[in-house]
Image (cartoon, rainbow, N blue to C red):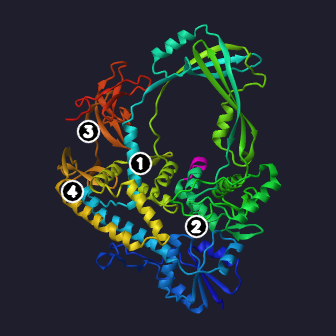
Amino acid sequence: MPKYLVIVESPAKVKTIKKFLGTNYSVMASNGHIRDLPKSTMGVDVENDYEPKYITIRGKGEKLAELKKAAKKADKVYLATDPDREGEAISWHLATALKLDDKKMSRITFNEITKGAVKTALKSPREIDMNLVDAQQARRVLDRMVGYSISPVLWQKVKRGLSAGRVQSVALRIICDREDEINSFIPEEYWSVDAALIPKGNKKPIIAKLTSYKDKKIEIKNKADVDKIVKDLNNAEYKVKSIKKGERIKKAPLPFTTSTLQQEASKRLNFSTQKTMRIAQQLYEGVDIKGSGTIGIISYLRTDSTRISEEADAMAREFIAENYGEKYLSVSENKKKSQAKIQDAHEAIRPTDISLTPTKIKDNLTRDQFRLYQLIWKCFAASRMDSAVYETTSVKIQAGEYTFSCATSKLEFDGFLSVYNDNDDEKEEKGNNVISKNFDMDTELKFEELETKQHFTQPSPHYTEASLVKALEELGIGRPSTYAPIISTIIARRYITKEQKNLYVTELGEIVNEIMKTAFPVIVDSNFTANLESLLDGIGSGEVQWKTVVRNFYPDLNEAVSKANETLDKIKIEDEVTDVVCEECGRNMVIKYGPHGKFLGCPGFPECRNTKPYFEKTGIICPKCGGDIVIKKTRKGRKYYGCLNNPECDFMSWQKPLDIKCPLCGSYMVQKGNKAVCSNETCGHVENIDKKASGEN
């Protein structure tokens, strides 16, 4: 009969850990949380000092009974849930639900699921850290208060079961603000002038960029400027003005945190944040490696620290010296600038054994597991290696009163790039000018041609999952464990949609964001949310009492909800009657709101269940066929402007078209903020908007 019981969260860990322990140990999984707040009510007793009302999660009764039976027989119970706030809270809930006394129970944690790490953890048991538990309780209670207080307001306003979250609402606002910025962006024209010059002895030309006029930086704003420059340079003599040689150091990357892993997996592997975390969890919990059994091959995946243990660092350095040579070892460790919000409880994400190279264990992994493990392995190995060194040459070329510049760089020492190359480095190498070693001040330059190009300034790009994670981290919103759930939640609620890699706001998302900004400005304020995250960190470190945070938060929230209910009652959306007649019963159809936005429904429901897509007319005439321009949505909910005569007319625009033509080229104009902009990008004409042209009253 086993004397000791080890309880972990995931069944996948059971198989791995069982192999490390003898017959005296039994290993069981709780399958995540055993207790939580009820779904039917807020579950927080506001009148009784905000005491949470925990219940056994539906469907977990049988599992709890199994654990109770095993715990009763065991001499000692080790709670080995994940080494973070959530894991600490699960251990506390288990101890409470299983009625374990302090003498019989111990908490153990390990940063990696290897034999050494598990055995070491068993030798250093501790008590449950109630500060971490309280930090998790505070987060859960705050999230529940926001969700269960605001969601009914949204339901009333938009008529269907929408919901709001404390952090998700801020993420939605960040995306909406970027969309507004893009939609109101006015492109500005500029030009570039490049000279193709062939140095004596070269077969290929070098491309020099025009950078200054009379030794002052030049800005070329239009075609007239370009024509003057081309005229000035006609028959100009091109001479070498200066040559500057130097060295550029490219530092090795830091090992991955949760955020940077998600960003790089998105960039290099095209993984969503959710997919990255799911596969990383598998690598952490254990993979069956031929000859080694089931072992966890990466360290804990939820971390915002770049710290590496001395043991792991020493192993990595020994491996690099042996396989790449001593000269590839970094002299000093590349460290991240310290930030107050960083929690240094865990190491960075790294392989548990650097000698398990991706190639060596490729046959034991699925394709996606291999690709993610390879990314983690390479980044960690590179982080212990020396910088890459480039030899740079910068040349300035004089042509009359104009100065052209060109630069080249040549890799002198690959350093960490021998393991972890960046696509940007490859592009840089391919696009490089080739300047020979013999190139000097007396080198003759043969003029080949001038290339002039028109450009327009571009707005900030749409957020991707990777760039949104980066923005959330920089703003101090959310923590490593929350990035993926935040994004997956607002996508699942259809507030945003993902097309290719870009995130776009849906009509539903715009409605919800507008209500949140109007009625609950504090909740969607990024500074307020970041400050709340700092308070949660303070609870985790024992500096702040969790109920103090909740006591200060709830009264303001409750007051905002009361005010919103009063305001929103006055502007309650009624079913708007249209001139569209229901062909099934003859009634005039009405505009209704559903989970995907507006649609036409029969007022005779439930007797008549006829529905139709609703297309809102803009009052603008189609520039192609003269039909009505209406607001439409893509299959995923992204708004655009199209012709009502579709499919006969294929006109569409992401920006709102206007009933005016461009005076320069005759193309239709579109609305961007309070400006009318030509839809023809090569024209770029901009003018102040006329309210009548925009279809406004």
Does dot 2 land on a helix, a strand or a loop?
A: loop
User: Percent from the top left, x then y, of residue 312?
Assistant: 71, 63
* Amino acid under disc 3: Lys
Q: Residue at x 35, y 32 (%)?
A: 648
* Amino acid under disc 4: Leu
Mark nearer the N terminus (4 vs 1): 1
Residue at numbered disc 3? 617
Task: Look at the numbered discs 4 and 1 and tell me whether their residues touch, using CB distance below 8 Å.
Answer: no
Magenta residues? 266-271
Residue at numbered disc 2? 345
Residue at numbered disc 4? 568
User: Percent from the top left, x then y, of residue 318?
Assistant: 79, 59
Task: Look at the numbered discs 3 and 1 and tell me whether their residues touch, using CB distance below 8 Å.
Answer: no
Farthest residue, direction top: 235
Mark 4 neighbour density, 10 Å: few (under 14) some (14–19) many (20 or more): some
* Amino acid under disc 1: Ile
Mark nearer the N terminus (4 vs 2): 2
Mark nearer the N terminus (3 vs 1): 1
Q: Residue at x 66, y 28 (%)?
A: 407
Mark 3 neighbour density, 10 Å: few (under 14) some (14–19) many (20 or more): some
Closer-to-camera residue (541/283) = 541
Task: Look at the numbered discs 2 and 3 and tell me whether their residues touch, using CB distance below 8 Å.
Answer: no
User: Percent from the top left, x then y, of residue 535?
Assistant: 43, 65
Residue at numbered disc 1? 175
How many numbered marks does the figure carry? Answer: 4
* Amino acid under disc 2: Ala
* Distance of label 2 from label 3 (alpha carbons): 56 Å
* Distance of label 3 from label 4 (alpha carbons): 26 Å
Mark nearer the N terminus (3 vs 4): 4
Does dot 4 land on a helix, a strand or a loop?
A: helix
* Image height of 298 relative to 260, above or below: below
